[in-house]
Image: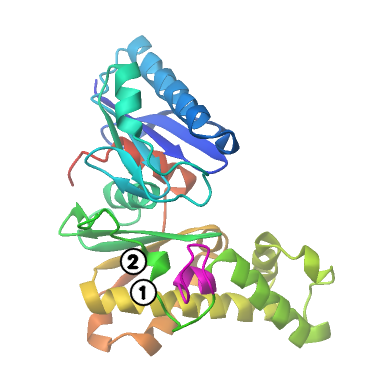
Amino acid sequence: MKAFAGIDLGGTNIKYGLADSEGKILTSKSKPAHADKGRSEILKRLEECARELLEYAFENKLNVPYVGIGSPGTVDADRGKILGVSPNIPGWGGTNISTRLEERLKTKVYVGNDANMMAWAEVLFGAAKGYRNVLCTTVGTGIGGGVIMDGKLVIGSSYSGGEFGHIPIVKDGKRCNCGLKGCLEAYAGSDNLIAIAKREIKAAGSRSKYKGSLNELTVRKILDLFKAHDPAALKAIEKQAGYMATGFASVIHLLNPEAIVVGGGIAEVCGADYIRLIQKALKQYAFEDALKGLKVLKAKLGNKAGFIGAAFQKEEI
């Protein structure tokens, strides 16, 4: 039986697993990335994960055609090499993952951008299954994105396609962690959500249910307050959804997708309420004709999407 091996490299953890041809997970694990220890240690950890998957496959008489890896940063998918800088993984730029691991594993290794891999998984097996023109995003500290057009992942001429979080939405605006100004991520990412919520809690005064120190406010607490119908949290999430809709409108007007998939903690916890806020805000920023038939969907595959997409990155819809 054929099985597909995928590894999702994060700044903190590596998630990895095997799936059958229908996307059903056969085994999955997670281990610390040790990204702070540098390039050699990360490559060692990736090799360990790959060997575990290949050994599991051998023991269970499974045929694995290749190992797929999803990595932060701009990825030269043709060579399996990291281009530029990955802010959460110091010294990762310039690493040729495929060359190193293929030599040691004696099997083909393909590498793609982690957000693109998440998007590919959602189109193959998740919320966007059945659609061929899709924008997928994940919202957390940063905002990742992947675009599928006519059933194919859009990588771009220099492997930088789908960088949804770095669409500029404010001229000369807040400085983003990427170094640019006015990026969507600087306004809709976790840091600014916390800043917005602090202002809303102050403005709400005794009407807010939050009684702790504002210095201890976290995204998790904001989401819990949202679920408890706290007025300050409701306004904060509504503003964040508005920023997301601003970015979505740019993509909608340019590419006219059939569906938008939203993943990450906010979508996971707030669910349909969050999706409705985005849909409401979209009406302010996007042409009515461009919104006809558009589906805004909550991601289905959670934190397994990264390694699932990586595992199937060379497969077609």
Identity of the amino acid at label 1? Phe
Q: Is residue 209 left or right of residue 129?
A: right
**Which one is earlier in the sequence, the residue at label 2 or at label 1?**
1
Q: Secondary structure at mark 2?
A: strand
Q: Is residue 183 left or right of residue 77?
A: right
- The secondary structure that most of the magenta stretch takes on is loop
Identity of the amino acid at label 2? Ile
Q: Is residue 277 visible?
A: no
Residue 260 — which label? Answer: 2
Identify the residue at horizontal 54%, vertical 44% (top origin). 11
- Residues under numbered marks 2 and 1 in contact, where contact means CB atoms less than 8 Å apart: yes
Foreground mark, 2 or 1, reads: 1
Look at mark 1 in the image and give the residue it sits on. Answer: 248
Q: Is 248 colored magenta in this rendering?
A: no
Q: Which quarter shows the N terminus?
A: top left
Q: Is 185 colored magenta in this rendering?
A: yes
